[in-house]
Image: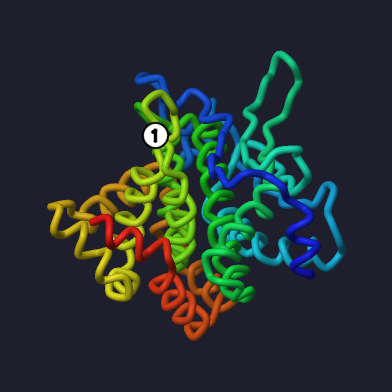
Amino acid sequence: MSRFYRFCLCLFTAFFVIACGGGGGGDDEGASGGGGVDEVGQPGTPVLNGSFNLSVVDGITTEWNTALTSVLQPSVAYVNRIIDLPKDIPISMQNCGVANAFYLPERSGESIAPIIFMCWELYDQIILYFDAEFEDDLDTSFQVTNGAYTHVMYHEIGHAIDEQLALPIVGNTESAADAIATVLAVEQGFGINTLAAALLFDADGDGSFADVHAGGADRAGDLFCWALGGDPTLAESFSSITQIFIDSGRDCVSEYAGQVASVSSWLPNISGPVGKATRTIASADALTEETLTSLRDAMLNSTAISNLLSAN
């Protein structure tokens, strides 16, 4: 698709706020576990045979629809192999009238089924930012945009999992959704996607005193820390950023280990035989090591990383 067409699609200002609906009852301290993921078939427990289903509701062009579907579908398939839901949840790629992505929880009294919206406008806004960041290197900006967009989808999937399985999350469900998204990405072998999202969120320097979403630098710092703590290869590639956390006394390896322990307690398949087999399948269908290396190099040389390093 031409750059002219992409730029005509989005005239939004460069604010990167992912406003998420959902999170279900996870804010309640007394929330119970997920209805028995390991107890399917026991009396009184629901049968968990639902899945996430990706679809294009109102796309742009056939080529565009195919390209975006091919980006997100492997990650949706990965999630479906390791997570069982009580019902199907659609992930709808469509025009929303706003650059956003969000999960709408179930409303039984209004007969509204749960759904995730992945808005075209958000993708367009992200690629506008990365086109400028990578100085019109369209291939790199496209790959990094895909990574950030996939992380955002995982974040919304985190909200859906929280609500559908009634996870025992205490506190801010937005941070919990970020943790779930990061663990899904890193365990799949795509921590680079989380770093792409971190670059995006770092560009939003607004404060977050009264916002359920953490502010740009704070949110970016968590994502960087967890992804680098969970992937030694990324930690070595981004050693200068890894060193920032070490110098500040933040133990990112332990933080990620804690995130994995929590997420695995809710989603046991993520660290079991199914998850390991799925990672092999996902890696075979994914970016080549050469592409990942070029993405790491491009991100290391980006203005965003340079600004991050100079600020510390």
Q: Is residue 53 above or below residue 195?
A: above
Residue hosting label 1: 207
Residue at 62 percent of width and 37 percent of height: 102
The image position of residue 48, as x and y in percent, is 59, 40
Q: In this view, does 195 lie above or below 291?
A: above
Which scheme is used to colour this image of the protein? rainbow
Residue at 78 percent of width and 55 percent of height: 8
The image position of residue 42, as x and y in percent, is 51, 34
The image position of residue 190, as x and y in percent, is 47, 66
Residue, far bottom = 290
Instruction: Give the SS element for disc 1.
Output: loop
What amino acid type should be assigned to the residue bearing mark 1? Gly
Quadrant where the image shows the N terminus: bottom right
Quadrant where the image shows the C terminus: bottom left
User: Is there any visible trace of residue 3 in the rendered image?
Assistant: yes
The image position of residue 260, as x and y in percent, is 33, 51
Residue, far top = 109
User: Is there any visible trace of residue 43 in the rendered image?
Assistant: no
Q: Is residue 222 above or below residue 245?
A: above
Residue at 52 percent of width and 65 percent of height: 133
Q: Quadrant of residue 78?
A: bottom right
**In the visual, does 210 lie left or right of 226?**
right
- Work out whether residue 295 or residue 204 is closer to the camera in this orientation and state it: 204
Q: Is residue 292 above or below residue 278?
A: below
- Work out whether residue 138 or residue 268 is closer to the camera in this orientation and state it: 138
Q: How crowded is mark 1: few (under 14 residues within 10 Å), some or many (20 or more)?
A: few
- Work out whether residue 257 or residue 223 is closer to the camera in this orientation and state it: 223
Q: Quadrant of residue 247?
A: bottom left
